[in-house]
Amino acid sequence: MDQSQSQTDSDDDKAMASLLAARRCLTSCLDRSRSLASALSRAGPHLEEIKHRLPSLEASVRPIRAPREALMEVGGHIDRAVGPAAAVLKVFDAVHGLERPLLSGDGPAEDLKGFLDVLTRLEEALKFLSDNSGLAVQWLDDIVEYLADHSLADPRFISQLTDTLSSLKSGSGTNQNLPEPLDGGLLSATLDRLELEFCQLLSAHSNPIPLQPPENSGDTAIAIAPSPLPVPVVRKLSLILDRLAANNRLDKCVSAFVDIRGSNVRKSLEALGIDYLGSPLDAAQMLGPHVQRWGRHLEFAVKHLLESEHRVCTEVFDRRPADSAYCFAEVAAQAGILDFIKFGRTVADAKKDPIKLLRLLEIFDSLNKLRLDFNRLFGSKACADIQNRTRDLIKRVVEGACEIFGELLVQVELQRNVTPPPDGGVPRLVSFITEYCNRLLSDEYRPVLTQVLIIQRSWKQERFHERLLIEAMLNLVKALELNFETWSKGYEDPNLACLFMMNTHWHFFKHLKGTRLGDHLGDTWLREHEQYKDYHVAVFLRETWGKLPGLLSREGLMIFSGGRATARDLVKKRLKSFNEMFNEMYQTQSNWVISDKELRDKMCSLVVQAIVPVYRSYMQNYGPLVEQDASASKYAKFTAQGLEKMLGSLFQNKPKKAASFNVRHSNGKVNHAGTGLYRSTSTVK
């Protein structure tokens, strides 16, 4: 029994040990399960990520799983496609390496040559990309197509490659068409800096030419040192333009050049005082000093300012003649050359006037002197507008001058029936025409007028002989002679008519002798007028003052015893007649004029000689008969000295507001003398 109990206890111990072992095993398994569960929970996201990456990994790995022969065949295609693409990528990296030297620091202002060298490298790199990126993309496109055709890659991978290559192919044209991400806008930003440097460089060296008024030359001004841009500056501008032109970016610089240089020239001209070019002018201003100023200013503008600008344009746009011509044309227009032409046109379009003829000749002479300069500076197609307007101005000037010159004779003849000067003086027409003709025959105007007439005749295919000009002048004088013969008949008082003829004949003789016109008229013609003057002087004296001495007759004045009272009455009677006639003639002739001082002094002297000695002698002999009379003052009214002084004051010129002549134009309208042929002679020049 003890053995059985002992056996039972032994079995229980074994069972407990087994149970404990099983417990330990279950606890260990439970721990391992828990660890595995924890590990599985941590591995979940990684597995999900692997799940997403498996398709691309599969696509990448699949070609490796292709047959060995297929892989061997596609290897050559891949090498040929990857080579150009790698070269393109290498250049692309180089492009981005140029960003810092091109976009940082002062750039072109600090070292233009170095900046342009880097820009050239950028242009070469971009050109390489432009020339080769398309080829590289095409090679890649071919290999992708091969992989797709032979199912050597996953279709999704092939689709992604195809989309990427399509976007590359769309931007593989010229440099300017490269997609923005390819160069990051580096070339455009670099060219912007070059444009800015061009404008700043040009502005810094474009200052109005300093002007200094010369001594004793009115309103004229002379340039101290008109010079073009410095050579180093021109060189820099040209280098900048070369690079901009290579990239089709000239427009902004051309526009800036025109604005800066045009404004520069305009300011230089404004310093001369050219406001009159754009201001409305009346006839007196247009036919006065403004035309002379216009000629001087135009010459200065063309020969100095625009000549300098033409040189600047030629030097800066050395290798681009079309741009040079365009810029100069625009600079000249902006500077105001068309304003000068417009002013000349305004004068040419003004109403006809003899003084205007002189101004038109001055305009033609100024333009003619600048003809070679105009042809050289404005000869390009870009200056066509300036050429056309200048030709039109010359045509109007020539036609206007010839028209006025051709109508001079008609205008003189139209004055034949007007009222002559009421004071018997020289008509303004006579003095004007004589001086006017001499002006036209002077060295200043005659060559110009001759050339104008030659040009006008050539347009009509007619020949011009210079003798025609002289004959036209002589015909004007002959018409004047007929005029004052007719005018003299318009006076009711024959003595005033005689004085008038005396004035005009003497004016012809004195004011034409020794002149160009007088030389053509000849000495015989001049002497005839001098003789006519002498004739009318004699007639005038005889018919006027020459009658006074006869009133102081001594007949019947022999004093005998008892006859003193009778003699006194005769003296009183004769002095009364003398005084009455003297007063009447003096009052009348005090309103008459002898225009020329020499002739006036001579005439007064002759009158004094004819009257005063006779009067003095008469009063010395018979004056005492009346001087003791209570009414002596009624008869002895004058002393000899008083008469001499009064007679010496006769025929003085009187201030005149305007001449008495009017000018009738071919349109039938009548202008006052102030605006016609008979303007004050002081306005001829």
Image (cartoon, grey):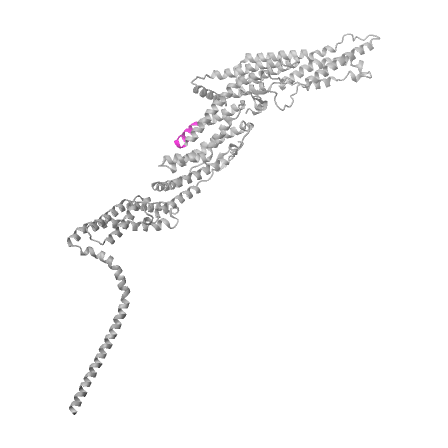
Q: Residue furthest right?
A: 562
Nearer to me, 205 or 100 = 100
- Residue 293, position in %: x, y? 51, 30
Nearer to me, 629 or 65 = 65
- Residue 269, position in %: x, y? 49, 35
Which residues make up the magenta segment? 370-382
Magenta stretch contains residue 377? yes
- Quarter holding the N terminus is bottom left
- Residue 333, position in %: x, y? 45, 34
Residue at image position (18%, 87%) is 10
- Residue 103, position in %: x, y? 37, 49
Image vertical order of residue 57 relative to residue 378, above or below = below
Magenta stretch contains residue 159? no
- Horizontal side of 504 relative to 612 (left or right) equals left
- Horizontal side of 109 relative to 63 (left or right) equals right
Image vertical order of residue 143 relative to residue 14, above or below = above
